[in-house]
Structure formats: structure tokens, C-alpha cells
Amino acid sequence: MTVLAAAEIERFGLTPRVAFVSHSSFGTAANVSAEKMRAALPLATKAAPSLEVEGEMHADAAISRVFPSARLTAEANLLIMPNLDAANITFNTLKVVGGQGVSVGPILLGAARPAHILTQTATVRGIVNMSELAVVARISRSSSRSESSRGSHVKPNRNRSRDLARGLHESR
């Protein structure tokens, strides 16, 4: 899932910087949750050696500063949580506090076709954002599929994704 999420960030023209977040930082706790996040680091590094990834670490440290010996070159822009509860709580908190109620997500990854989730509290702007995201994903997928059927490999259209990201950001 980390690699899929990083690829989604790249579709927006951003360099993914991943932090495995926990209540523990770099081995300070030895319970199941912390060990799960600690064990994820070598798995992600093996699956995507060029990916900037660090952890396990506190979320505030991941998004506010870079440790001198950290693998991240800047603040994390992809936070991997230890479980769905933590992810959902964090997403909804950041949506209200940091995004003035505007968000893009949650983004469903790994499905055969673009599909996303809307919550009961989704605003009209949130519904439009998620619809645009699904359309861009579908167009990118169609473009890649038609090009590969002609024998050439084309990456998904990142310009459309960047334009969408700019539009979503400017709509705030």
C-alpha cells in the first residue's frame, strides 16, 4: 500500500516523502503497533529502493522538521498510519483544522478501476474534487492502455494530474 500511495502522490507531480508514523520514534517503544511500523520500513525500502521513506516516528516530527540523519530530504507528505482508526482520525482532523474543510480523499488504492469513497460529511466541493480525481485516473488509465496496445509504453498523463492538483489547491 505504501508504494501504491507513493505512486498516487507522483501522479500529482510531487516527490513522495513517506513517514511511518507511530507513538514511538525510532525504537523507543516495543509494543505491537510500534513494531509493525518499524517492520514496514525495510519492506518499503526493498519494494521501492529510490523512495524517500523514514520511520517509525512521531507525526509532528515527520511533517514539521527533518532529522539530520533522516532519509527524507524534506517534510513528509505521505503519512502511513499503524491502523485504519489512526488514519481516519488523522484524516478527519486535518481536513477540518488544516484544510478548512476541503480535502481530497480518502483515495481508494489498488482497485481495478478508479473508485473513491465519500463520507456523509462530504461537501459539494469535496464531491467535485473526488469526481475530478476519478475522471483523471480513468483518462490516464485509458491513455496508457490505448498506447500500450499500439506497442509503446506511456506513463499516465501527469499534466492532467498536476492541473487537477493546482485546481484543487486554488479552490480552497
Image (cartoon, helix red, strand yellow):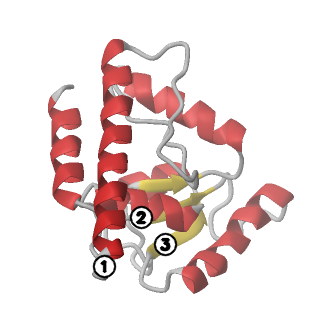
Residue type at mark 1?
His
Residue at the farthest front position: 150
Task: Provide residue 100's location: percent of width, then percent of height.
Answer: 32, 21
1 or 3: tag closer to the N-terminus: 3
Name the residue nearer the viewer: 124 or 115: 115
Task: Provide residue 85's location: percent of width, then percent of height.
Answer: 70, 36
Task: Provide residue 17's location: percent of width, then percent of height.
Answer: 40, 65
2 or 3: tag closer to the N-terminus: 2
Residue at disc 3, secondary structure:
strand
Q: Return the residue at label 1.
A: 153
Residue type at mark 3?
Val
Q: Quadrant of the C terminus?
A: top left
Residue at disc 1, secondary structure:
loop
Checking the image for residue 7, the label placed there is 2
Q: Residue at x 76, y 64 (%)?
A: 36
Q: In this image, 69 relative to 35: left or right?
A: left
- Label 1 packing within 10 angstroms: few (<14), some (14-19), many (20+): few
Up the image or down, 55 lies above or below 159; here it is: below
Q: In this image, 73 relative to 80: left or right?
A: left
Nearest to the eye among marks 1 and 2: give it.
1
Give the Cα distance between marks 1 and 2. Answer: 17 Å
Name the residue nearer the viewer: 57 or 5: 5
Q: Quadrant of the N terminus?
A: bottom right
Q: Return the residue at label 3.
A: 53
